[in-house]
Amino acid sequence: MSTKDRLLEAGLAMLLKQGYNHLGIQALLAETGIPKGSFYHYFRSKEDFALQVVDRYMQEVHQGLDMSLGNRALPPLQRVRLFFELSREKYRSEGYLGCLLGGLGQELSGVSDTFRHKIEGCFNLIAERITDCLEEARQRGELAAEQDPRQLADRLLDCWEGAALRSRLRRDPGPLGAMLDFYFSAATR
């Protein structure tokens, strides 16, 4: 693994656990054993580093979306639910720390337009991918014809982020499963 990749991987775990404001560059360097000069070779600043960590996180998100939404053996609604079930399992493996986008968004959106725009853009990309699958479900009659797939995708992400926060607070997957059950039963009525 390259030096930059080691920094990004360690930074992802640290940002998820500690947030942006409590992430110290010295602690990151101590964690990775990488000298300070190497950090500034790859990143202009702590902000640049965190933005690149978000990009790395989105690579993982897109892999999950590809794995689930691209699974044509499943009906569209099951593919959408599978993405969130895979996310729930990832959260479990990380100690229910939740979504990096949600955590950074809550921490920084009120003080940094750069992060607010970046994170909202990431959520829009996710919603677009989910919208395509929900549109397929609507065309197959799995959703009512009058339902707007983009609105459904946005509400799903909104609900998920709230449930992820509650899951983090409780260190318990219950809110995630309850939200998925509620959403998918309500959406298909």
Image (tube, rainbow, N blue to C red):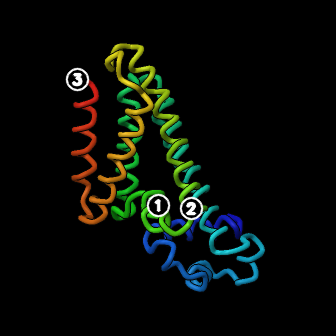
Between residue 120 and residue 100, name the one nearer to us: 120
Q: Amino acid at mark 1?
A: Gly
> For the residue labelled by badge 3, is the local secondary structure a helix, a strand or a loop?
loop
Earlier residue among tags 1 and 3? 1
Q: Quadrant of residue 17?
A: bottom left
The Cα–Cα distance between marks 3 and 2, rounded to whole angstroms, is 37 Å
Q: Are marks 1 and 3 in contact (CB under 8 Å)?
A: no
Residue under pointer 2: 115
> For the residue labelled by badge 2, is the local secondary structure a helix, a strand or a loop?
helix
Task: Give the image location of residue 145, x and y in percent.
Answer: 36, 15
Q: Eyeballing the image, is 40 above or below 96?
A: below
Task: Give the image location of residue 71, x and y in percent.
Answer: 47, 28
The Cα–Cα distance between marks 1 and 3, rounded to whole angstroms, is 32 Å
Q: Quadrant of residue 80?
A: top left
Q: Residue at x 34, y 64 (%)?
A: 95
Q: Amino acid at mark 2?
A: Phe
Q: Are marks 2 and 1 in contact (CB under 8 Å)?
A: yes
Say left or right for 92 vs 19.
left
Q: Eyeballing the image, is 90 above or below 107?
A: above
**Label 1 Cα neighbours within 10 Å, binned few <14 / some 14-19 / many ≥20:** some
Q: Residue at x 50, y 77 (%)?
A: 21
Earlier residue among tags 3 and 2? 2
Between residue 106 and residue 99, name the one nearer to us: 106
The N terminus - image quarter: bottom right
Q: Amino acid at mark 3?
A: Arg
Residue under pointer 1: 105
**Label 3 Cα neighbours within 10 Å, binned few <14 / some 14-19 / many ≥20:** few
Say left or right for 118 vs 99.
right
Between residue 2 and residue 55, name the one nearer to us: 55
Q: Eyeballing the image, is 144 above or below 77?
A: above
Task: Give the image location of residue 147, x and y in percent.
Answer: 35, 23
Residue under pointer 3: 189
